Amino acid sequence: MAGADTIFIACDVQDADFVRSDIAPLFEERPVEIFFFGDTQEHLPPDQSLVVTYLGDRNVAKFIQRAIIHRFIIGVLPHPDMKRSGDNFGVAGTLADAVEDILSGGDCKKMDVLFCNEHVVQSLVVAGEVFSVRLGARETSDLSRNILVLWQLLQTRKRLRLKPISVATEEDKSLDTAALGIVVVEQGRNSLLSRRVLKDPPCNDGMVNILLFAPRSVLEIFWFILSSFVVFGKNGGRLPPFAGHIKSRTLRISGSTSFDYSLDGAPMSAPEILLSVSPKALRFLPGRNMEDYADECEQKEKLRVGALPVGQARLDLSTKPLPWVRHASADEFRELFLLLKSNATASRSFLALMVLSTLLAIVGLFANSASVIIGAMILAPLMGPIISLAMGAARQDETLLANSAKTLLVGLMICVGVATLATLLIPLRSLNGEISARLSPTLLDLGVALISGTAGAYAHAREDIAKSLAGVAIAVALVPPLAVAGIGIGWGERAVFQGASLLFMTNLVGILFAASITFLCLGFAPFQRARRGVLLSLALGLAVSVPLFWSFEGMVEEQRIVRQLEGVTIDQVVIQGVAIRRETPLVISLRMLSPENPTAHQVDSIKRRIEDIIGLPTKLECAIVLTR
């Protein structure tokens, strides 16, 4: 009969000889009894016995259930078929070290045990598509394997569809949503993915954690796979943008069809997934590699489910294959449409702000004050109807298109009219720097408009960054070019009017095109519906780009001439302060630094040398600066 100091060793039948010859002697003077546990099984030791296991992962999980019932204290030895158990119990790498840890008389610890449909979970449970399984279980950032995942994702893209599920917690909180993949863990240490996104430290808190992955598009999955091994490593504690986290003592996951899932790598299937935790149910002797647990843990339920689809979005994503580009549901952009419809209306506030911003812009232009003009940019309300017009074009919403176009036209007429009237009343006629800067738009201005349109549409769609709209208004500057166009009318200068009008059209077309594309990418319009509006915006953009291209070419040519002439010495005369004005012939303004006043013949000779250098006929405007 076994004594109180007897150590029981559980092993498979095929390992019996090895245990007797190589493992039992390591326990030295302690009495040892061997029993078989596995496919064939003898009687179990008495309750509360010290049992040492030499088993693979699958049998360790089975034995844990018996250990809980019989209140065994278990020690775990390394086994060729064991990986997860070794990580969980901190088992040493060699048999001798593991036996030493068991015999060292260390304190017995208690561990929570996670059950999934009455099966012990040592690592994690994964349900869903292949990419979810790999991201949940893989602990490597090998590039070739990530590329393989991406390739397999491309091949299975048409079969990707979110599964409608219902999740119920112990506190009777329920959630009806849809998910493509589910990862279940008990503690944050059990898997790489859970450890990176769960904020709680490893502890016996009696709680189970599930991560629900609900991407709205294939592109979101691609980004997640590409960035998961880089971004998550730097931003631990943050969920992916399309994931939810639920923490509770018990969880029941149900759906309209059965679940195919993986439990510690073993494939299983069940009508529903029932998760529960037996708190501190298992007594064990930790190995030297055992991770420390927090003494105190928060035991409150957590539901971080803001990113999960509900309502109409849940139905759309579960009945159709996952789209390439995210499609927002009516529930999600109802508030955005209310905002855009409001912006498309020529309200009293809109009219008042148009008048005030135009007057402020006129004062800033005539005063040559950039700070005053920036104030007019912020005050101007034109960005609202333009973004509404872009949404109307993207969704082919005739009402939104008509209202925003009317409001935009009213704003243009007010701005140009007020600017013209103010110009007639102000007795100044000076083409200063701020006015001149808005007469020669180039492709760079179109680039600014495209970026600003993207930022404006994104800021309208994302409530948390709406405060950035002021920066967008400053960047794109809608009212100042209209005010300069009004100045051109007031002065009767067609060149001023045409240059400023071209700049405004550049800004308008660039914003419309970029905002339409942005709303399309954010899922606010299907491509079939948005195609007509996007193509029209693109055609306008191409038409505007023609004069902008020639203007840009001219700017590049001017910079080339300035670089060729600046600092050049011709007949002991130094050329500085070169400025170009595009006329026929080309007008070059510069300063000539000379120790003596040059004669007319010398100036003519310098002019000919300049024409030889740049290869163009010129008209020279020079200032003579004597140096001593």
Image (spheres, grey):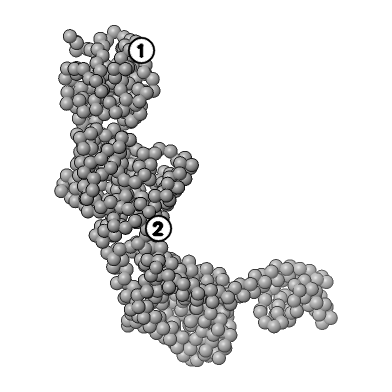
How far apart marks 1 and 2 lie (CA) works out to: 59 Å
**Which label was assigned to residue 96?**
none
In which image quadrant can residue 525 be found?
bottom left
Which callout, 1 or 2, points to the residue nearer the camera? 2
Residue at which label 1 appears: 22
**Residue 87 location, x and y as percent?**
34, 30
Identify the residue at image location x=44%, y=71%.
534
* Label 2 secondary element: loop
In the picture, measured across the screen, residue 100 lies left or right of residue 496, that is: left
Give the x, y percent position of residue 318.
Answer: 28, 55
Binning the other alpha carbons within 10 Å of mark 1 as few (below 14), some (14 to 19) or many (20 upward) gives: few
Image spot of residue 169 (x, y percent): 19, 46
Choose between 377 and 451: the one closer to the eye: 451
Q: Quadrant of the N terminus?
A: top left
Quadrant of the rendered image containing residue 459: bottom left
The relative height of residue 318 versus residue 518 in the rendered view (above or below) is: above
> Residue sitting at 23 percent across and 45 percent down?
258
Few, some or many C-alpha atoms within 10 Å of disc 2 (few <14, some 14-19, many ≥20)? some
- Residue 399 makes an appearance in the image: yes
What residue is shown at x 57% (from left), y 88% (from top)?
Answer: 493
Viewer-closest of 393 and 271: 271
Residue drawn at x 55%, y 74% is: 545
The image's mark for residue 324 is 2
In this image, 355 relative to 106: left or right? Answer: right
